[in-house]
Amino acid sequence: MRIIDGKQRKIIKFIELGITMFVWLLFILFLTYLIPPISNNYFTVNKDTFFLFALIVSFISLFIVISLTILWSVYNKRKYGELNRREFPNDVSLEELSEAFGVSVKEVKHFQTVKWIDVEKKLTQEDLQTALDLSQFFLEYQPQFQIKTGRIEGVEALIRWKHPKSGVLYPEDFIPIAEEAGSITSILEWVLSEACKQNKLWIDMGISFVKVKVKIPESLFYQSNFIEIVKNVLNQTELEPSFLELEITEQTITRNISQSTMILNNLSNLGVKLAISNFGSDLFSFKYLQSLPINTLKMDRSFTASLFNSRKDNAIAEAIIELAYRLDLNIIAEGIENEAQLNFLIQHQCNYAQGDLLSQPIMALVCEEMLIGMQEIAAEGSMGD
């Protein structure tokens, strides 16, 4: 949802006011020039009287419109002002806030988004460093399911910031600021380290064959020490490289194909698995897929969202799945939100799926319970055979 700031709201209100005045002027002209004088046995009204009457009515109406606008603004300021002044625990639900302040859930979401944007504008490099020092960052994991078996094949590590004033912030709220401030390397190194530590812990618990997946932004991918960062994290966490998969967007790779090929080859030599995310969203030449050491294609979520809009949209998704099969690559569809999308992927034999329909991003402990439960079910099934 696009957020309208205060300046834009004032412009919109002035436009609405101008339209109102214009409509009333048209009304005056209509009364003055199009309606003939009204006359009967009791009174006679000429055009001048009509004009004066219409003018008075228009000014009264305009005054009412302006007054109502001011009153509505004051009401909203008081209503949301109380919501803004108070601090709430992070586990307070949108429904509870909605009921407490007499506003809709949609309004609460809108208010939170605006508040987060205001906080984001004030973020500095010191804030980000403080977040690292005080362990305010944490990870959630969104499982990726093997469609054929329903087994969890991997989990994508997603960073969150438990901001002391604004609650939980998401990557889009602070990663661009981190890139501008030069803190992105420290933050992503922390993400890599925490994700690898967690996966090593799961493996030591007996949970195997699950890859942890981390998105790598362009600003970090092309850093001269990026390979060294990955190597150091793997050495420190003692995670087998094949249990780490790095996702690089199609746009990042195509920005400098020769340099990205060299970087990807170096990562592949470490034993790390590699995926192209947002696949299909850019003018990617298919000939590069033969030379790049890629293991997985992650179909851009826009294709999943547009399924069933037209036959052409379906055909593109089918073609991407078929392309992955022909090149012996895994294919993941993300953004699965309804049964129809999932059934389409099942029908066309897509390997893996990720989305809120299957599982929202979850904390490590919840994910651990899911992994253990699935492993126990698989073990029971093999004993039954």
Image: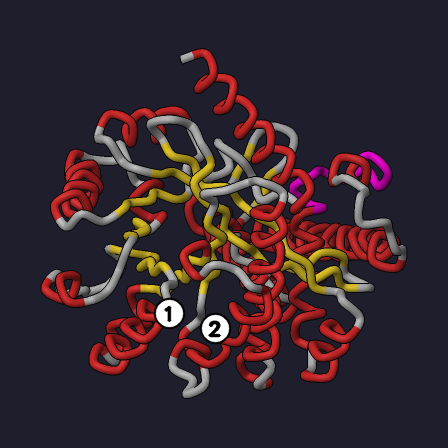
Compare residues 351 and 272 and report the one nearer the observer: 272
Say what amino acid the circle numbered 2 marks: Val
Compare residues 312 and 209 and report the one nearer the observer: 209
Q: In the image, which residues are magenta?
A: 99-108
Q: Is residue 378 above or below residue 330?
A: above
**Relative to 134, 178 lies left or right:** left
**Relative to 245, 315 lies left or right:** left
**Relative to 264, 217 lies left or right:** right
Q: Is residue 104 magenta?
A: yes
Residue 230 has which mark? 2
What residue do we see at 86% from left, 51% from top? 88
What residue do we see at 16% from left, 34% from top? 311
Question: Is residue 49 among the parts visible in the rendering?
Answer: no
- Under circle 1, the secondary element is helix
Q: Given this view, does label 2 or label 1 mark the residue nearer the observer?
A: 1
Q: Residue 206: image x %, image y %?
A: 58, 40
Quadrant assignment, res 139 = bottom right
**Quadrant housing the C terminus:** top left
Q: Is residue 199 magenta?
A: no
Residue 251 has which mark? none
Q: Which residue is mark 1?
A: 270
**Relative to 355, 118 lies left or right:** right
Say what amino acid the circle numbered 1 marks: Leu
Q: CA distance from mark 2 to mark 1?
A: 9 Å
What residue do we see at 69% from left, 69% from top? 118
Q: Is residue 169 above or below residue 382?
A: below
What residue do we see at 15% from left, 67% from top? 291
Residue density around tag 2, few if under 14, some if 14–19, many if 20 or more, within 10 Å: some
Question: Is residue 118 among the parts visible in the rendering?
Answer: yes
- Under circle 2, the secondary element is helix
